[in-house]
Amino acid sequence: MSNRQNKTDVILIGAGVMSATLGSLLKELVPEWEIKVFEKLASAGEESSNEWNNAGTGHAALCELNYTSEKPDGSIDISKAIKVNEQFQLSRQFWAYLVNKKLISNPQDFIMPIPHMSLVQGEKNIEFLQKRFEALSTNPLFQGMEYSEDPKKLEEWVPLIMEGRTSNDPIAATKIDSGTDVNFGALTRMLFDHLKSKNVEINYQHSVEDIKRSSDGSWDVKVRDLNSGKTEHHTAKFVFIGGGGGSLHLLQKTGIPESKHIGGFPVSGLFMVCNNPKVVEQHHAKVYGKAKVGAPPMSVPHLDTRYIDNKKSLLFGPFAGFSPKFLKTGSMLDLITSVKPNNVLTMLAAGAKEMSLTKYLIQQVMLSKEQRMEELREFIPNAKSEDWDMIVAGQRVQVIKDTDAGKGTLQFGTEVVSASDGSVAALLGASPGASTAVHVMLEVLEKCFPQHMKEWDPKIKEMIPSYGVSLTENPELFQELHTSTADALRLNNKELVYS
């Protein structure tokens, strides 16, 4: 195969929700650009985006307590919650645009309305929750949030959690009905079907082995066809590395200065899934608790109603696990081979700093099913072991880098790393990830195509009306968009409940 045929404008590595989102944005902005996708697995959305590999919470900071921290003076900092919520609104707007333009259909196959709740026990935690509620409920993005300590009210909201509760510990909760459950696997597959219809070339079972800069400044991507074993070379002006945990190794292969002094720490997750439909039926909410003292933010326990394969499910977790793999389908050598001369000190510094995390992970890995059931019984006092099975969730790779806070700082967010000339970008990190895919991909466009942003601006605003605007400061616009996106995505239809 001659290289002449293998020239393209854009190469997307990985067929997850990030590549799907970036491809869909580019196809609207510059339909004439040629795009190729390479994915190691046999279909789209099989790794981090798969519905069983993430919590499916439309992360809008409605219930996640780790987005609102308590300041030394006792007041609550809600700036991160506002930021995450605004970012999720961009996703909602883009999805609504795709539905309205009939580029994707049946939104209820990937997004469903579900109340988001925070639940805490003990006076100190209740005091925190009350202050959080007061701080958030004055903000237009969080209107409609309710707070209660009344056991009768809580029985109405979460009967399964309240039934059989013998502890005298006071308990309180907040509830907001505008939350969502998002099936990112289904969304990813829909977006790739849409891209295919727009003549995007999608190559499954193709593994990217290397990425090198060519003399003309474009990127040469070496790809192996896993079926035939043949190696091909493809060149593109722009490459996006959206391979989940696999992105770090590929970013390192580019050799760009921005790829240095960055490491990754893999954390796997386990969920318990309820196999008893009678129990599933008694719960209708995503209920987030507070992380235990010493536990990392990604380990916040939550009991979630999920809609998967048009069926209502109930999941509890996550329990942290450890595997040196960077992907569920990765290699046991992933962690070792990610250590390079330029990041070894960063990695070692993180290891020394994060002893408590390491200890926490070891304890989590050692838990028996019965010990996990005990943690579940803090949420569902009457939970029976035979009603619950364990499933392994996705691998997440937390970014480790040198920051103002010191060498080897563990990052708990999602990060875009791009070359100074914008010709290559990689996505690293974990939560809130998929929920904020549209915001993150707009950031990729801003970093990598600054010369086009002015001409693209009107189209971006057509797709995502609040782009560049603070919804917090424009409550009327928020109200209008929240209503119109809820209509487009059919989130107002309360009667739509799967059996």
Image: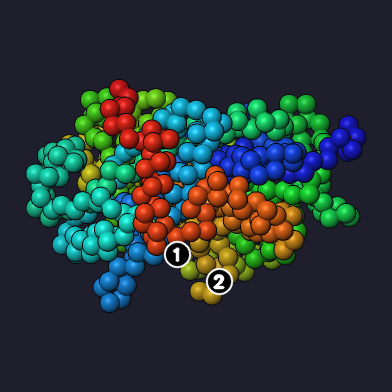
- Which secondary structure lies at badge 2? strand
**What is the three-letter code of the residue carrying label 1?**
Met
Closer to us: 31 or 362: 31
Spot occupied by residue 196 in the image (x, y as percentages of width and height): 66, 29
Q: Residues within 10 Å of mark 1 (few under 14, many from 20)?
A: few
> Of residues 310 and 368, which is closer to you in this image?
310
Quadrant the N terminus occupies: top right
Residue 345 seen in render: yes
Residue 481 position, x and y percent, is 41, 46
Residue closer to the observer: 135 or 59:
135
- Looking at the picture, does residue 308 appear above or below residue 366? above
Q: In the rendered view of the protein, which quadrant contains the C terminus?
A: top left
Q: How many marks?
A: 2
Q: Nearer the viewer, mark 1 or mark 2?
A: 2
Residue 361 visible in the current orientation:
no
Left/right placement of residue 39 relative to residue 46 reads: right
Determine which residue is flagged by label 2. 403
Query: Which of the 4 quarters of the picture holds residue 133?
Result: bottom left
**Which percent across, then down, holds residue 56?**
42, 40
Q: Is residue 175 above or below residue 108?
A: below
Residue drawn at point x = 39 percent, y = 62 percent = 473
Relative horizontal placement of residue 497, taking residue 431 as reference (left or right): left
Q: Dot 2, crowdedness within 10 Å: few (<14), some or many (≥20)?
A: few
According to the picture, the residue beneath numbered tag 1 turns out to be: 355
Identify the secondary structure beneath mark 1: helix
Quadrant in the rendering for residue 376:
top left
